[in-house]
Image (spheres, rainbow, N blue to C red):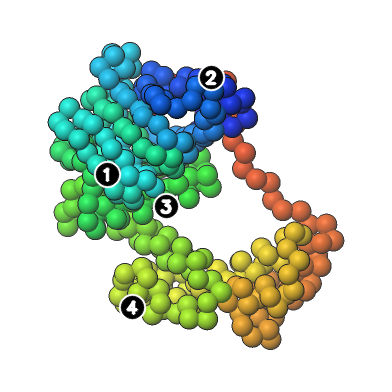
Amino acid sequence: MSTLVFSTRALPARDQREAWCAWFDPVFGLDFSGEPLNSGFAAESIVWQAGGAAFSRVSAPRLRAVRKAVHIRRDPTDHWVIGLGVQTSRISLEGGRLVVPAGQPFILSLGEPSESEREADERLHLYLPRDRFASLAPELDRVRGRGIEGAPGRLLADYLRLLADAMPRLTEDERVRMPEAISAMVAACVAPTAARIADAAAQSDLTRLERVRQVIRRRLGSATLTPATLCREVGMSRSQLYRLLEGEGGVTHYIQRHRLRASYAALTDPRDDRPVAAIAEACGFHEPSTFSRTFRRAYGVSPSDARAAARAGSAPGPRLSPAMGAETRSLRACLQGL
């Protein structure tokens, strides 16, 4: 089982907290002190197993999670965890208290006691078993209990977000090959050397490419979306940007491809009743004739014909809807399977 989903959202509100506690027991204990006993706790955990590692995205209300000596005795898992939250995290460790700003990755070991307090948040967690990632042991143990700051921290945060975006679409074969790529990227961020940075170059490029893609999506309809704009917003030089997108056909082609894909998706969405010209402008094509010509060259039909074909019966592709197997009903079972 490589994709696991656990959600309390379909449960009665009175049962949600108990179900969420059961999912994390005995890896973590959850403390809801101060919260009304019958208040709901709508939360979801998605875990992807990837060739010996595990990656999770957790959306949950405010909580306090503890891993005390009693939890470690019951569950001696000592994986490293690289976390990233949208909100500030306050973590108490044996060596002191760690305050991690929003958007900064941090590294903990499940082999050590910890207490974490956070507001409602969406968090990413990368679980790295010691046996599978033994080559990283010295570096990860050196920085455990710390946040990763500066440029390495920003790069690692972007990489975790990239994994969250990519994991649902990866094939089983691609997931099996992930540990090598993860090792190279984590090593380059927590203990950067020239050799490790070179080993992680491909992963670094994927992370930078994701940043470029996010800027393009955010500013898709802007007439000022240019190579200069991208350089400024992603923080790289013109030569770096052109090298990064050389394999994608160049900067201008890459932007245009995203605009065409967005326009095609809108035109073939039966719920989108905007005029063709409005869709074109929203996707960055401000000249209708240019849009029509470019669209036909890419897809072999005019925008109007594409919309008509979709409305004549073309259905969207199936959505990924992973289900949790009956044999995996807790985070502990998932981590033990790594």
Q: Which residue is mark 3?
A: 162
Q: Which residue is mark 2?
A: 327
**CB atoms of marks 4 and 2 within 8 Å:** no
Residue at position x 29%, y 48% in the image: 101
Q: Which residue is mark 1?
A: 100
Three-letter amino acid code at the position of disc 1: Val
Q: Which mark is residue 193?
A: none
Residue at position x 26%, y 27% in the image: 114
Q: Is disc 2 surrounded by few (<14), some (14 to 19) or many (20+) residues within 10 Å?
A: few
Q: Secondary structure at mark 2?
A: loop
Image quarter where the C terminus lies is: top left
Residue 68 lies, in percent from the top left, at 27, 20
Q: CA distance from mark 4 to mark 1?
A: 33 Å
Q: Is residue 304 above or below residue 27?
A: below
Q: Which residue is mark 4?
A: 238
Q: Secondary structure at mark 1?
A: strand
User: Which quadrant of the structure image shows residue 16?
Assistant: top right
Q: CA distance from mark 3 to mark 2?
A: 29 Å
